[in-house]
Image: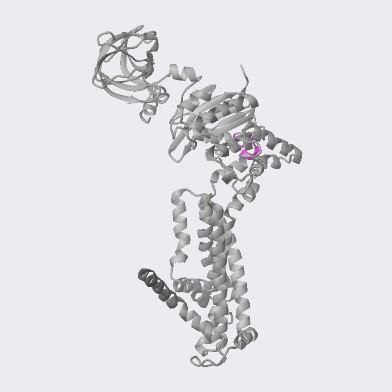
Amino acid sequence: MKRKLINLIGITKSYGNNVILDDLNLYIRENEFITLLGPSGCGKTTTLRILGGFETPDKGQVIFDDRDITQLPPNMRDLNTVFQKYALFPHMSIAENIAFGLKIKKKSKAYIEDKIRYALKLVNLEGFEHRSIDSLSGGQQQRIAIARAIVNEPKVLLLDEPLGALDLKLRQEMQYELIRLKNELGITFVYVTHDQEEALTMSDTIVVMNQGYIQQIGTPEMIYNEPVNAFVADFIGDSNIIDGVMIQDKVVEILGTKIPCVDEGFGENTPVDVVIRPEDVEIVAPGEGFMDGVITSVIFKGVHYEIEILANGYEWLADTTQCYTAGTSVGIRVIPFNIQIMNKPESEDEEAAEIDV
Amino acid sequence: MVKKWSERIYLGVIFLFLYLPILVLIGLSFNNSRSRVVWGGFTLKWYASCFTDETITGAFFTTLQITLAAAVISTLIGTLAAIGISAMKRKNRSIMLGATNIPLLNADIVTGISLMLLFVKFMNLGFVTVLIAHITFDIPYVILNVLPKLNQANRSTYEAALDLGASPAYAFYKVTWPEIKPGVFSGFLMAVTMSLDDFSITFFTKGAGVNTLSTMLYTELRKGIRPELYALSTILFLFAFLLLLVMNRRSDKQMTAGSF
């Protein structure tokens, strides 16, 4: 296993009565692409700003490379940030922007020029040295912001929703660019976003946050396939989240129907949340599934149709490539492996965390 | 066609109302006769005597000193204040802005009397009190010019500079200053104009012996009108006009530079 580079221990931060982060513990390994994912106000940006040194936590420690840097100002930290709105210096040329950090470190002129050329090549903007910032598109500006950060050879690059202002196509391109950069440079990326697709595409590890608490930490596959609670399930992709009762091992009852599943160890007659991904809902002829219903709406999404089925009082969401018409009676089937059983939230905090989605 | 002409005539009448009095004044300043109704031929002698008259030159230098000193000091204080205000939370910021705007909206004469009452309690009225009074009413103009630039200047550029290793002072000098510089200069020019043509506040805070051009003009006019005063007024008008042109040029340039 790779070394832990950053360790956040018991970080607490509040503004007035508003608690942003409550006893947050998180470590980040060397050379990892870690994404802090959550809705706005979940504390992800505050966590990043604490890492960057722009905020000081009320309680807790930031350990970086075995050193306590909690009180260290941003200019003394060995990490660089790519800001949400690029934050390029408008009165400087692109070369001057990129050279900013190197000049402060009193690097030689030849070294700086080399670095500028190298960084521009890395972000696919060769020959842009003397252009002005205003002449660039949003995507190009973001690349320059990344170039400006990486020439300083930081151990960690912090990225605060860097693709938020770009259009869909550009955002997808930049996602691949970022993955490539991370592999070529071999530095640790800490990425903040509210976009689950971005998080799933790029990350080695995803940290799902809500209301100042970490909900789940895991690989993209783990987070998507085995969400630990209804919040994570709902935030990562669409989900059917249904109240259920675990009758015994491998049998769960939802909406008055007992269906087989693969989960064990929940006890008998325990209330649970049942999560079924829309792409796992199979539409079959009436009577062939475990439940019958009527299609209430069909929406074309390009790759697939998004279909709503009213069955036993619940609006099921199903994704399918086949077209149906609204009003058709159908059956619903889900193979046991695709039924995810989760414990109901225990504390009030967790409950509260689920309401504000 | 009719519409176009009526528009032009309407505009012409308005400008006539605005500028005729000043044009008359300028005309009279070149009149080689002490009469206000008879044209005695063109002359520059009033301008010449204007520059040799000791009352006038004395007042001119006092004005120059007060205007420049007040503008420089208020630009300094106002810029720092604007930086402070922009960093405040929203509620405090609007309270602070309201407080700094009061001298702007308050009737000059009330500000003048209040300052006078305050000053006589602690010191003798004179050059220093006029200077302090000018700084007081100049500051809001500087703040109003600098603050929009600070808000425009993305706060994250300053943080980005820190992030890249700059000390707070270096980050301000390299990143924030270039962005607010135009605002600071237009604030300075505004302060100069305001100080230059202030009468009421100066009148109440100056005490005996100190005269700026505007208060000097007022006392001289009470004694009787001299053609030198027309010449002086013309010069003052032209100077204000020039400042206005400079300010407009600056903002035009920024508009073109800012649009992309």
Magenta highlight: main SS: loop
Asked if residue B78 is positioned above or below residue A35 in the image, the reply reads: below
Residue A71 belongs to magenta span? yes
Q: Residue at x 61, y 86 (%)?
A: B44
Q: Would you identify the image quadrant in which residue A109 lies?
A: top right
Residue A213 can be seen in this image: no
Across and down, in percent, residue B85 comes to 51, 53
Range of residues picked out in magenta: A70-77
Q: Is residue B159 magenta?
A: no
Residue A152: where, in percent of width, then height?
Answer: 67, 35
Position in image of residue B17 (x %, y %): 42, 77
Instruction: Determine whether A180 is above or below B258 in the image.
Output: above
Residue A138 located left or right of residue A315: right
Residue at left 64%, top 51%? B173
The answer to whether residue A286 is seen in the rendering is yes
Numbered-mark total = 0
Image quarter of residue B64: bottom right
Quadrant for the C terminus of chain A, please.
Answer: top left
Name the residue nearer the viewer: B194 or A214. B194
Q: Residue at x 63, y 44 (%)?
A: A131
Q: Nearer the viewer, residue B61 or B126?
A: B61
User: For the N terminus of chain A, which image quadrant?
Assistant: top right
Q: Image check: A207 left or right of A275?
A: right
Report the coloring of the rendering. one colour
Q: Position of residue A303 (x, y in %)?
A: 40, 22
